[in-house]
Image: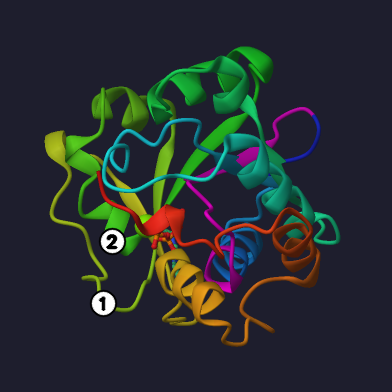
Amino acid sequence: MSESGPQHPRIGVFGGTFDPPHIGHLVSAIDVRDRLELDTVILMVANIPWQKAGSRRISAAEDRLDMVRAAVADVPGLVAGDHEIVAGGPSYTADTLAGLQREHPEAELFTVVGADAAAGLATWERFEEVVERSTVVVVDRPGAEADPAPLPGGAEWVRIEVPHLDVSSTDLRARIIEGRPLDYLIPPGTLRVIEERDLYRDGAAEVTS
Ligand code: ATP
Ligand code: MG
C-alpha cells in the first residue's frame, strides 16, 4: 500500500531557471511523477540562480514563472512553483525544501535534477540538508554522465531513465534569435508568452558580463 494521498503527499521539486521551459523539462517531470508515483512535481522557478548569475542576463523571474505556468497548465500533476521568487534573494534548494516541509509537514519530498546538474550536487549550498530533507532523483540528460559521483556522506539517490532529449534552453534561445522553428520543443502556451512579450529576440540573454 502506498502512503501517498492527501495525508502523505509525495512531492517532487524540479528546480531550474526555465529560461525558457522545454520538452526536456516536461518529459522528465512527467516520467518521474509516473515512475515514483508522486502526487505533484513542482517546477520550481529559481529567483536568482546563483550558479548562473553573472554569466548571462537571466530573463525576469515573472516572465520565467509565467512561461512555466503556461507550460504546465494542461498537465495533470505538474505545477509551477513561485516559492523561490516569493522568498526573494538567491535560490537555494535547502531553503526551498525547508519551506515546503513547513507547508506540508506530512509530505515526502523528492529533489529532481538532470544528470548535468547532479554532477554538481556536492557544491550546492547546504547540500547535506537537501539530502536530509529529500530523496535525490537523477534523470538522464544527453552529454552528461548518467550517474553522479558518489554523493558526500554516501547519500542515497534514485535514477530514473527518461527519453534522451538533447534540448536545452541555451539552444532554444539561439533558435529564437535565429528565427528557427520551436514547435514541439516548447509547449504552445509558452510560445505564446514568448511572442506576446517578445522575449529573447534581442539576444540580450546571451550577453556575458
Ligand atoms: P540552460 O541551457 O539555460 O542551462 P537548461 O536546458 O539546462 O537551460 P535549466 O533550467 O538549467 O535548463 O535546467 C533545470 C533542470 O532541468 C536541471 O536539473 C537540468 O539538468 C534539467 N534538464 C534541462 N534540460 C533537460 C533535458 N533535456 N533532459 C533532462 N533534464 C534536463
Ligand atoms: Mg542548465
Q: Which residue, given by chain and number where applicable, does mark 1 sit on?
A: 143
Mark linked to residue 116: 2
**In the image, the residue with mark 2 has its CB under 8 Å from the nearest atom of ligand 1:** yes
Q: Magenta segment range?
A: 7-25
Q: Quadrant of the C terminus?
A: top left
- Between the C-alphas of marks 1 and 2, the distance is 8 Å
31 or 2, nearer to the observer: 31
> Is residue 32 positioned above or below 136 on the image?
below
- What residue lies at 21% left-to-right and 55% top-to-bottom? 119
Q: Earlier in the sequence, mark 1 or mark 2?
A: 2
Mark linked to residue 53: none
Picture coordinates of residue 28, whole percent (x, y)? 54, 66
Report which quarter residue 205 is drawn in: bottom left
Neighbor class of circle 2 (other Cα within 10 Å; few <14, some 14-19, many 20+) is some
The picture quadrant for ligand 1 comes to bottom left
- What residue lies at 13% left-to-right and 55% top-to-bottom? 149
Picture coordinates of residue 183, whole percent (x, y)? 69, 84
